[in-house]
Image (cartoon, grey):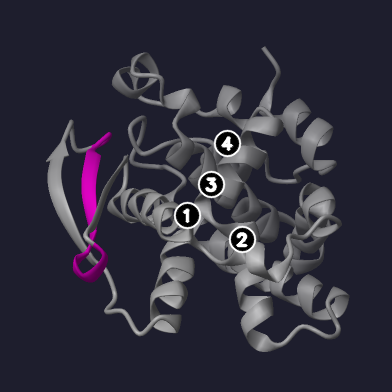
Amino acid sequence: MTSPENWSQKYLHYEFSQLALLECALTHRSHSAQNNERLEFLGDAVLGAVIAAALYEQEETADEGTLTRLRASLVKGESLADIATEIQLGDMLVLGGGEARAGGHHKRSFLAGGLEAVFGAVFLDGGYTAAHTVILHIFAARLGDLPDFDQLKDPKTLLQEALQAQSIALPVYTVLSESGPSHDPQFEVMCKIDRLNIETTGRSSSRRRAEQAAAADAFALLSQ
């Protein structure tokens, strides 16, 4: 199995002076009281600053709203989990026995949090310049292939704008059910547009994503 040190050199192109920081960044709270939660908090802030600066320099004609949406699309949990999967971060996570047996090495929330923690560890180990270099290396492909502005709008926003354009009241979102264990819940949400007699449902491991799924189906019906 690849060591954390070799993994960092291979995927981050970074060599830690304080290897204990990397080891902590890869340790989930299910394994130890000394875990990556504080580093995750720090890494989130560092990541946001680096990406914001990169977008400011790269997208010279973008207004504040566009820059905000671009940054959100890059640093959201789903994007971070995708990146973490690409660089095989899951294989490096140190989990408690229960989480390991439950497939924790592939849980997207663990992957996203672990990646942020790694960025925090790099920041503490080598300073802002080191974190800046690592993050831009990791995000190079995505910064070079940014989505169009219209693609940045989430389904709820698209649905809201479409309804407002027709002077129709905004939809109502209702949680129909919440099931599963606390570490892996499942939400079912209904999106209802009374005037158009539209009712759609969405399911996901978070209420927000379930609402987005329901909104996407409602927007598709509205667009027909």
User: Distance from label 1 to label 4 (Cα)?
Assistant: 52 Å
Q: CA distance from mark 2 to mark 3?
A: 9 Å
In the image: residue 222, left or right of residue 196: right
- The first of marks 1 and 2 along the sequence is 2
Residue for badge 2: 73
Give coordinates of residue 45: x percent, y percent: 57, 68
Q: Which residue is mark 1?
A: 224
- Secondary structure under tag 3 reads helix
- The crowd level at tag 4 (other Cα within 10 Å; few <14, some 14-19, many 20+) is some
Q: Is residue 62 visible?
A: yes
Residue drawn at x 59%, y 22% is 91
Viewer-closest of 29 and 200: 200
Specify the quadrant that holds the N terminus.
top right
Of the image marks 2 and 3, the number of the one nearer the N terminus: 2
Check residue 129 for magenta coloring.
no
Crowdedness of circle 3 by 10 Å Cα count: few (<14), some, many (20+)?
some
For disc 1, the neighbor class at 10 Å (few under 14, some 14 to 19, many from 20) is few
Q: Amino acid at mark 3?
A: Glu
Neighbour tally class for label 2: few under 14, some 14-19, many 20 plus, Cα within 10 Å: many
Residue positioned 56% across, 66% down in the render: 153
* Element on which disc 1 rests: loop
- Tell me if label 3 and label 4 are in contact, CB under 8 Å: no
In percent of width and height, residue 18 lies at 68, 45
Residue type highlighted by circle 1:
Gln
Residue flagged by tag 2: what amino acid is it?
Ser
Q: Percent x, y for residue 32?
A: 36, 34
Task: Tell me the mark number nearer the camera, choosing from 1 and 3.
Answer: 1
Q: From which residue to which does the magenta span run? A: 183-196
Which residue position holds label 4? 23
Counting from the top left corner in percent of width and height, residue 150 is at 65, 68
- Answer with the quarter of the image where residue 13 lies: top right
